[in-house]
Image (cartoon, grey):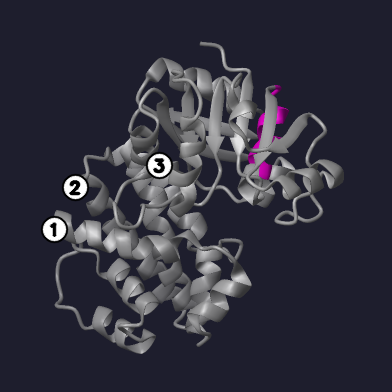
Amino acid sequence: MRIERIAIVGAGAWGTALANAIARAGRQVTLLSRHPDSAAALAHTRESPRLPGIKITEKVAIAAAAPSALESQDAVLLAVPAQELRGVARLLAALPARDIPVIACAKGIERGTHKFMTQVIAECLPSVRPAILSGPSFAEEVARGLPTAVTLAINDETLGAELARALGSASFRPYRSTDVRGAEIGGAAKNVLAIGAGIVTGRGLGASAGAALTTRGFAELFRFGRALGARPETLTGLSGLGDLILTCSSPQSRNFSLGIALGRGRALRESSATIGLAEGELTAAALVELATQLGVEMPIANAVAAILDGTLNIDQAIENLMTRPFRAEV
């Protein structure tokens, strides 16, 4: 299967960045906004309000998201928030059944169902090939063409190689994998842990505490991943450890920025309104609920979830973590 025509549903920061990146790879790219008025404005200004100052290349076609705009595509990327992915996938369900790759570009776990993004796609669209694009990447840097490496996971090795060729360029390098669940786990868990890292920074607890949280957070991510059958090399790769390091260390991450605001004493609602969508805020409860079902111990993720739902304040959460029984490092 030769992949040349690619649609991206979702014209926010990440969708816009991916459109520019894939156009650089020489593919025919259509960026689809879920809001008709926004599509018209984007087509006129060639600039997303989510990425001010960065032009959408003229090589990218812009249109409103509709089944008719997806009929002739070789692959579809869903660049929408994790909790909205199911609704967007239903847009494709109006199309005749087609055996094409549909790639989730969101990092999260669906609330209520505890499903990962490719599971949602498979449930809504039984005929397609679900895939996940994840890894250490900030939208602004990808949009500008700065060097970025990511993980592209799909069950079919041959199709994965063709997708990597179609999406990859000199500045955007996808490493393919068949460990779909492993690639999804890293992206979902690291967002929650990044809120914790931001809280440490915002509270002024020091670089040592930040390093400890990131390291022990990775131990939690690794345990969780292994319980779901993820491969160690995936969890220690770009979509696991790589993404965790990036997200736990830069205010470009909305999750890290949300944690900083909370650590400085700002209210959650006020912080969310200022910063914008932080996927970890909506994933935290689903993550710890699923970990509990699996019998996986995730004290840092649990502390973050408790802070977000108001059952613990930050000082209580820190005390609980620091007074846990002494144990071997595993």
Which residue is nearer to you in this view: 77 or 134?
77
Q: Amino acid at mark 3?
A: Gly
Which residue is nearer to you in this view: 106 or 257?
106
Q: Amino acid at mark 1?
A: Gly
Image position, residue 249 (x, y; %):
52, 63
Q: Are marks 2 and 1 in contact (CB under 8 Å)?
A: yes
Say the numbered circle drawn on residue 227: 2
Q: How packed is label 1: few (under 14 Cα within 10 Å), some, or many (20 or more)?
A: few
Image position, residue 189 (x, y; %):
36, 56
Instruction: State the predominant SS element of the stretch in magenta.
Output: helix
Above or below, 36 against 210 in this view is above
Above or below, 168 against 196 in this view is above
Say the numbered circle drawn on residue 161: none
Above or below, 195 against 117 in this view is below
Q: Are marks 2 and 3 in contact (CB under 8 Å)?
A: no
Q: Which residue is mark 3?
A: 237
Note whether residue 236 is visible: no
Magenta-tinted stretch: 16-26
Image position, residue 10 (x, y; %):
61, 44
Q: How packed is label 3: few (under 14 Cα within 10 Å), some, or many (20 or more)?
A: many
Q: For numbered disc 1, what is the local secondary structure?
A: loop
